[in-house]
């Protein structure tokens, strides 16, 4: 899985005024926890986070807090309800060799049999929650829909990948080929 590097500075003050001043200075308050380590509070420059937050991809974050390196994943992001600015980020510490739970984007490949018959492909789920070690986590989950017929769907329970486990509920619909008026009319016409 791709890594994303971020430089950070520790923070000592946790008052409302201090946090407000940090945000005014273009910094985002963050915390890292988990993996039997104490919570560590730090700040990151907001513009450094754009390629991590506003992207469909998922990354392992290589955090550099004043020279101390730590691998982690973005656990939760809080946004301002009006301006959509990043207010706070939570990171979860991870170790190589130990299982990680992370959302990974889904990539649909192929042209469905149902689409060729006049149906319309609808992608419902863009990311799936998976569990695996850092070494085995893929950048994307590729799903081939070539044999997907008209009126059928692919659910998370249908998918199997080597070395990773899908945590999303088995009934989660990934994509489906819906019947369209053109496909219904073509099916109703008698063949000669």
Image (spheres, rainbow, N blue to C red):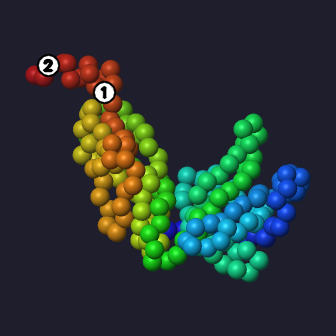
In this view, the residue farthest toward the left is: 192
Q: Is residue 107 visible?
A: no
Question: Dot 2 corresponds to which residue?
Answer: 190
- Between 66 and 57, which is closer to the camera in this rendering? 66
For marks 2 and 1, give the CA distance. 18 Å
User: Circle 1 sits in a helix, a strand or a loop, which is it?
Assistant: loop
Q: Position of 120 compared to 113: left or right?
A: right
Instruction: Looking at the image, tell me whether mark 2 or mark 1 is earlier in sequence order.
Output: 1
Please identify the quarter of the rendering in which residue 137 is found: bottom left
Q: Position of 192 compared to 112: left or right?
A: left
Q: Residue at x 42, y 62 (%)?
A: 131
The local crowd at label 2, few if under 14, some if 14 to 19, many if 20 or more residues have their Cα within 10 Å, is few
Q: Residue at x 76, y 59 (%)?
A: 29
Foreground mark, 2 or 1, reads 1
Q: Position of 157 compared to 124: left or right?
A: left
Q: Split into 4 quadrants, where in the image is the C terminus?
A: top left
Q: Position of residue 159 (x, y in %)?
A: 30, 54
């Amino acid at each position: 899985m791709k890594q994303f590097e971020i430089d950070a500075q520790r923070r000592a003050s946790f008052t409302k005024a201090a946090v407000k001043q940090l945000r005014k200075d273009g910094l985002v308050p963050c915390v890292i926890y988990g993996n039997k380590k104490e919570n560590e509070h730090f700040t990151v420059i907001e513009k450094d986070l754009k390629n991590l937050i506003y992207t469909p991809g998922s990354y392992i974050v290589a955090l550099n807090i004043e020279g101390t390196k730590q691998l982690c994943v973005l656990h939760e992001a809080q946004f301002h309800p009006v301006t959509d600015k990043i207010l706070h980020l939570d990171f979860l510490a991870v170790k190589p060799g130990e299982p990680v739970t992370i959302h990974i984007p889904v990539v649909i490949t192929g042209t469905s049999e149902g689409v060729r018959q006049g149906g319309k492909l609808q992608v419902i789920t863009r990311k799936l929650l998976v569990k695996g070690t850092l070494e085995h986590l893929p950048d994307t989950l590729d799903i081939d829909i070539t044999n997907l017929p008209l009126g059928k769907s692919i659910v998370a329970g249908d998918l199997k990948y080597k070395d990773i486990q899908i945590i999303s509920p088995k009934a989660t619909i990934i994509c489906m080929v819906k019947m369209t008026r053109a496909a219904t009319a073509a099916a109703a016409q008698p063949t000669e």
